[in-house]
Image (cartoon, grey):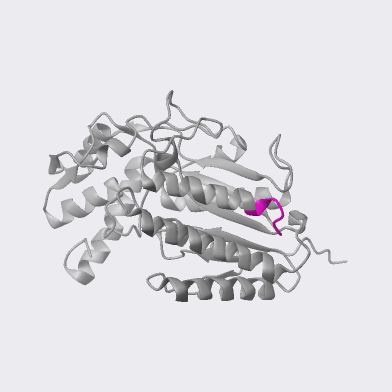
Amino acid sequence: MTSTGPRPPVSWVVGANGLLGQHVRAALTRRGLVHLSPPIPWSAPDEAEAALAGAAARLVAAADGGPWQVFWCAGAGVTGTSFDRFVTENRMLRTALEALAEANGPDRSGDDGNAVFVASSAGGLYAGSPSAPFDEFSPVVPLSDYGRAKQEAEHIATDWAVQAPARVLVGRIANLYGPGQDLAKPQGLVSQLCAAYLDRRPTQIWVSLDTLRDYLFAPDAGEMVVDAMTRLRHGPLPEGVADGGVVTKIFATQRAITIGAVLAELRRIFRRRPATVLGASPTSSQQGQDLRLVSRVWPELDRRTLTPFPAGVQATLADLQLRMQSTGRARP
């Protein structure tokens, strides 16, 4: 007699070409899960909103009465991005969530296996918080429009979750690095240093070398996020969180290192000192110096073997070398 288990969810990865999104998509593929990643015309906001609403309806239709899950990994803004850009990004999130609720119909229970993940930023939210290391219960004190925008995105998800057709997971992500990073964005120290090494040019560093950051290899982050969503869908929820509430979890190695230590490791790998220029930037004051992180929520999900930092740097460097072979330089 053949037994059948619960139907696997149909997944939608929003921002599937970004650093986190592409590795979430890869993790879903490794699990054999069906996933949709329709292109969204982000540069045309009105068209993007229509595309998001249409994609939400197609997701629910593809699930055909079974479970679905959404991974919101979109967002091009960084520290220093204009406030208006963040307003537009959060409007897109609200549009997608409202479209999901409308497409799902009157049954607004999250108990049937539907789930939504919203990527947030640990660095942006805890930049002004005292007393590191920070966990999910630490006070949130953003210093930049970027951090405040991520806080607003969490509020949008929280408000929607009250009567949502899905459980909701907010992921506060550490500093991601790894293959596939968009070097056109002024972020990603490890990738920027690797690109500068290949292009034989200096990298500007805007914060002090004793600044502490938690560097999480993006493929590891993708696996962790997908595993956390599986846990979210099948419960139980963390203590104190009822259905209709939001589960917030930090995704990090929980082993921060200084920028000076990063430079020392890259010197060993490159076999020469990375060329760097220390400078001051208007955004330097918007970033915390000590961003050590620890997760208290579902800590069993963090008991895994993560990619060692040197191996992650080597993988990042190899990815950039492939790009360089096709374009002549590591940066776009």
Give residue 284's position: percent from left, percent from top.
Answer: 25, 38
Q: In this picture, which residue range is highlighted in magenta?
A: 160-165
Q: Residue furthest top?
A: 131
Q: Looking at this view, is 272 or 204 the one in front?
A: 204
Q: Residue at 64% of width from left, 45% of height from top?
A: 246
Where is 178 relative to 292, above or below?
Answer: below
Drawn side of residue 117 relative to residue 306, left or right: right
Drawn side of residue 325 relative to residue 132, left or right: left
* Residue 74 makes an appearance in the image: no
Q: Looking at this view, is 274 or 276 the one in front?
A: 276
* Residue 315 makes an appearance in the image: yes
Q: Looking at this view, is 19 or 132 the one in front?
A: 132
Q: Residue at 52% of width from left, 32% of height from top?
A: 135
Q: Quadrant of residue 332?
A: bottom left
Residue 194 belongs to the span the image colors magenta: no
Give residue 272's position: percent from left, percent from top.
Answer: 13, 42
| Numbered disc total | 0
